[in-house]
Amino acid sequence: MDLRLPSKVLEHILSFVDSNEDRNSVSLVCKSWFETERRTRKRVIVRNCYAVTPEAVARRFPEMRSLTLKGKPHFADYNLVPDGWGGYAWPWIEAMAEKCPSLEELRLKRMVVTDECLEKIAASFKDFKVLVLTSCEGFSTDGLAAIAVACSNLRELELRECIVEDLGGDWLSYFPETLTSLVSLDFSCLDSEVKLSDLERLVSRSPNLKSLKLNRAVSLDALGSLLRLAPQLVELGTGSFSDKLDQEAVSKLSQAFSEMKELKSLSGLWDVLPEYIPLLYSVCPGLTSLNLSYATVQMPDLLELLTRCSNLQKLWVMDLIEDKGLEVVASSCKELRELRVFPSGAEGLNDTNVAMTEQGLVSVSEGCPNLESVLYFCVQFTNAAMVTIARNRPNLKCFRLCVMEPFAPDHKTQKPLDEGFKAIVERCKDLQRLSVSGLLTDKAFEYIGTHGKKLRMLSIAFAGDSDLMLHHLLSGCESLNKLEIRDCPFGDTALVANAAKLETMRSLWMSSCCVSFGACKLLSQKMPKLNVEVIDEHPLETRPDSSPVERIYIYRTLAGPRLDMPEFVWTIQKNPEIGVSHLAIK
Amino acid sequence: MENSNSYSPYSSSSVDSTKPSLSVNLSLSLTFPSTSSQRATSQDWPPIKPRLRDTLKSLRLRQRGYNTALFIKVYMEGVPIGRKLDLSTFSGYESLLENLSGMFDTSVICGNRDRKHHVLTYQDKDGDWMMVGDIPWDMFLETVRRLKITRPERC
């Protein structure tokens, strides 16, 4: 008796299955389910562009409409991955152009995107709608013009923190008069001035425009006229907020803000002058997201703003907010879910005069019951504070603490911060992401290995005593997916002993640690399903096996060794004649 | 521990982090500001993104700039005697160009689009001569050492 579901029925059922995690499970049931699922999947996410080939992806999902790709490892954000390492978008765009010409959406993160890529997109995908580039580089404003002119159904064009060769603001004028479908435009990372009249015309013919993020060069005066043309905006990133306006212009701008009844997210606010902060008061009660990381605003001026943001869920701010300001957040922003506090003194290299300590975060953990995601840069911290935070907020999902002084101990007891992080991983049972810092011994990592069972991503810098540290993590953290480590004193023994674990993870990054060349070779031989990349400025052919390498990046892959490696990236496939010396592993 | 990697020619932290040119070998012009004993260089610690790092640099500059002037020498090509200019009095490239055009009684522009006008160039802290106008004003103030107004090119 044939008990199989007819594929049409299965297709219909699957149309309700949205999450890719569920779809991945569906495709494992049996061959026919695999086939039906792959033919109906519209949204494809590849979190490591080297884990699989573009051709394989295009072949498996012919009906793909949306593709999300990630390239370089996370530490590339902090200048730890040399230029030219890889992450090229071109092979993907080429493959999709050929096999999936109905592609409508492309979201790329940390990839190298050239003008040729953008021109190819513009020429190949007739119904292209969405382009979101996050932390990408390699293209110029000419490439943007190509997209603007050709994609007649464009809905979203977002450049988030990209490094763009800025040849001027002309690209914006390439949007044709017939383009009326724009929903989201983000060019906040560009430097050049765009022509205000072009921008105004574009905004006025885009009735569906919900998100507009301007660059710094857009003046405050220009902002006023833009807001009057688009009072329906849900997300706004202003330009520079510091030009001197006359009284009439100020009141017009104030009026424009008060007309924005839908506004939920506010960012930009470069150089905002204290006297202009009251302009924002009318939108504060509606805000769920506020990004003040470029608003170098000092304390008293922030208070009035924050007390009005009673619905705030996400707050990104400089440590100029100080403990006092965070206390105000704790009492005013009861809906807060995510807090990020950035270091204003980071480039100062001097002592900052900012009065922000661990107490600020403790206050927020006490006052905000929904707080689940924290990124906190602080000069020093204490175990007691972390214990309190963990007790207050066992619902934390993401805890990233960056004590900026490497090896800084608990500044009250001078002890390592082991006990503090122990409290965090013990109490916060759903913790998925953790960044540790300060003075830490192997004990801290024993705790993390024991308790961090749901931990998926872990970042470590300047910590630990020995290989035991790495061993605890690799053998204990069952859900570990991404591990990134810099400047820690280990790990041949731990790596080789836990080699099998690496196949269950997406990737491992280690830089400025003590991994020897010999261990890398051994690992490569033992684990053929991993790409073991050694990223090192010095030529490796003449290296003794015992010498430590600068950086390693290990990731599981179905695609085998990649063909686009630069000179400074070595894998075993490059020099197969180099044997493995057993003397290398101590 | 391993050899000091206090300077890495392949590091992506180039001098001008807003414009990494993929065709130029950045390794040749890279110098690291940190002392060799510190592993954490100012380009990769604390871990913040490039755009935030740039913003903080210019914040620091502005804090400094409130009490220090920024006098630099300006030469017109072909004219042996130069002038001195306080860059901190200008709000941006436009006001700088306006002032220079007035000072030298000719039209001075940024960029090489128009070969009929005098083009403004500057020497940066690495000693290289660059076209004025490519980088944000705040970064320019931090790196400029002197200015030179070039003669218009004659075809």
Image (tube, rainbow, N blue to C red):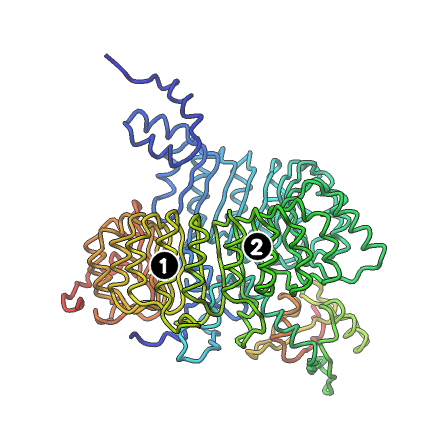
Work out whether residue B8 can be spotted. no
Query: How many numbered tags mark residues here?
Result: 2
Chain letter for the residue marked with disc 1 in the picture? A
Asked which quadrant contains residue A194, the reply is bottom right
- Counting from the top left corner in percent of width and height, residue A45 is at 42, 41
Image position of B36 (left or right of A308): left
Quadrant of the rendering where the C terminus of chain A is positioned: bottom left
- Counting from the top left corner in percent of width and height, residue A4 is at 29, 18
Closer to the N terminus: mark 2 or mark 1? 2
Q: Which label lies toward us, 2 or 1? A: 2
Secondary structure under badge 2? helix
Image position of A267 (left or right of A409): right
Any mark on residue A330, and which? 2
Any mark on residue A484, and which? 1
Work out whether residue A275 can be spotted. yes
Q: Are marks 2 and 1 on the same chain?
A: yes
Asked which quadrant contains residue B87, the reply is bottom right
* Type of amino acid at the residue the image marks with label 1: Glu
* Type of amino acid at the residue the image marks with label 2: Ala
Image position of B94 (left or right of A5): right
Secondary structure under badge 1? strand
Chain letter for the residue marked with disc 2 in the picture? A
- Counting from the top left corner in percent of width and height, residue B16 is at 55, 68
State the residue at coordinates (74%, 87%).
B81
Mark 2 is surrounded, within 10 Å at the Cα level, by few (under 14), some (14 to 19) or many (20 or more) other residues, namely: many
- Counting from the top left corner in percent of width and height, residue A54 is at 38, 42
Any mark on residue A368, and which? none
